[in-house]
Amino acid sequence: MSLTILNNISSLTAENSLSNTQMSLQKTLTQLSTGLKINSGSDDSAGLSIANGMQANIAALTQSQQNASNGIGMLQTADGALSQVTTLLNRAVTLATEASSSNITSGTGSQAVALDNEFQSIMSEINQIGTNTNFNGQNVFTSNAPTAFTSTQGSLATTTALTSGSKTVISDAATGGTFVFTAGASSKISDLQASITAAVADGTLSTGTALSLTGGKAVIAEGGTAGITVSSNDAVMGAFAQSAPTTGGTNTVFLSDGTSTTNLTISTAISQLSATQLNLNTSALTSTTNAQSALTAVNNAINTVSAQRGVIGASVNRLQAASNVMNNQVQNLQSASNSIQNADIGKTVANMTQFNILQSTGMAALQQSNQAQQAVLKLLQ
C-alpha cells in the first residue's frame, strides 16, 4: 500500500460512519422522548398514514359515544317525566272511580266538587310537566322548530294599510338585536315585510326571519332557534300570539366512525305531552256520568303514556348497544394504532446503548486515522 497525504481515506470513512451513528442516535433519543417510533413522515410514511386514519376513526367514534350518551340522557329525562305522569294518572283513576259512585254528595262544597278539583289539578300538573321538562335547554315534549307569531286580526294582504304611528317590535335572542318598525301615514304590510328583510341583512334579526301571510293573517317566523318575541300595537294586524307547537320533539343522535359510508342517525319521536294530547282536557268529575267517561279517558291515557315509554325504552336500549359496539371499536383501533406508532422501549434503549458505544469508538477511530497520516513526516527527517 502506497503512502499518500492528499486524501485521508480512512479518516473520511470514520467521519462518515460517525455521522450516520449520530443521526441514528438522535432518532433513537427522539423516539424515547416521545414514546413514538414514527415522529415524521420520513420514519414510516405508510405507517403514519394508516395511524392517522385510525386516529380520525377513534376521534369520530369517541364523539359518537358522547352523542349516544347525550341522547340517552334526553330519553331518560322524558321517561322519568312520563313515569311521574303515570303516577298522576293512577291517582286520577282513583278519583274517577270514587266519583263514579252515587253515594257521594254533590253541589257547592260537596265531595264531588272536591274530587273534581283534585282531578283538574292533576291535569294542570300534566300540562306543567309537558311544558317545562327540558334537557340541555330544549323542551323534551314539544317540537324544537323555530318559533312563529301570528296576528290576531285576519283578512290581511300585503297592500293592507297599517295604523299610522303604530309600532311592531321583534326581539331576537340569537342575535341580541331588537327590531322596531314605526308605521308611517302610508305604510303597508309590504313595508313591514321589507323592513324585516333589511333587518335580517344587517344582522339585527336571524337569517330566515320573515313575515308572511297565511289564511289572511300575518305570521312572523324566526330563522334561528334561540327564540324571538313579537309585540305590536297596530290595530289593523292586532296583537301577535305565539303559535303553539302541534308536534312533539325528536331525539336525533348522529353516529359515525369518521367515514362517509358508515354514518347512522337514530331518531326517536317523542309525542307532545298535555291533557289535550291525552284527550283529558274535557274530562270532569262533576257527575257520576262524567266521572265514568273520565275513567275511560284516563285508562286510555295510561295506555298512551305506556306505549310512549315503550318506544323510548327501545331507543335507549338501541343507543346503549351502539355505544357498547363503538367502545369495542375504539379499544381495538387504539390497540392497532399503538402497535404501529408506539416505540418498543426495550428495543429502543438497546439501540441507544449500541449507538452510544459506536459514537465513542467512531470518535476514537477518527482520531487514530488523523494521526496515521503524521507517520509520513518521519520519512522527511
Image (tube, rainbow, N blue to C red):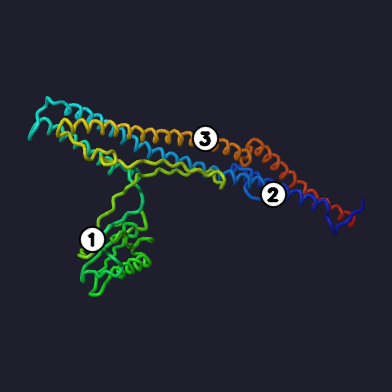
**Foreground disc of the pair 2, 3:** 3
Q: Which of 292/262 is in front? A: 292
- Disc 3 to disc 1, C-alpha distance: 56 Å
x and y percent of residue 35 in the render? 59, 41
Q: Which of 101/44 is in front? A: 101
**Foreground disc of the pair 3, 1:** 1
x and y percent of residue 286 in the render? 14, 34
Q: Amino acid at mark 1?
A: Gln
Along the polypeptide, which appears first: circle 1 or circle 2?
2
Q: Secondary structure at mark 2?
A: helix
Q: Amino acid at mark 3?
A: Val
Along the polypeptide, which appears first: circle 3 or circle 1?
1
Q: Secondary structure at mark 1?
A: loop
List the residue tagged with mark 1.
153
Q: Amino acid at mark 2?
A: Met
Q: Would you say 360 lies left or right of 232 here?
A: right
Residue closest to the far right: 1
Residue at x 49%, y 34% (from the top left corner): 324
List the residue tagged with mark 2.
23
Q: Which of 294/319 is in front? A: 294
- Residue 59 seen from this side: no
Kindly indicate whether the residue at mark 1 contacts the one at mark 3 (C-beta within 8 angstroms). Answer: no
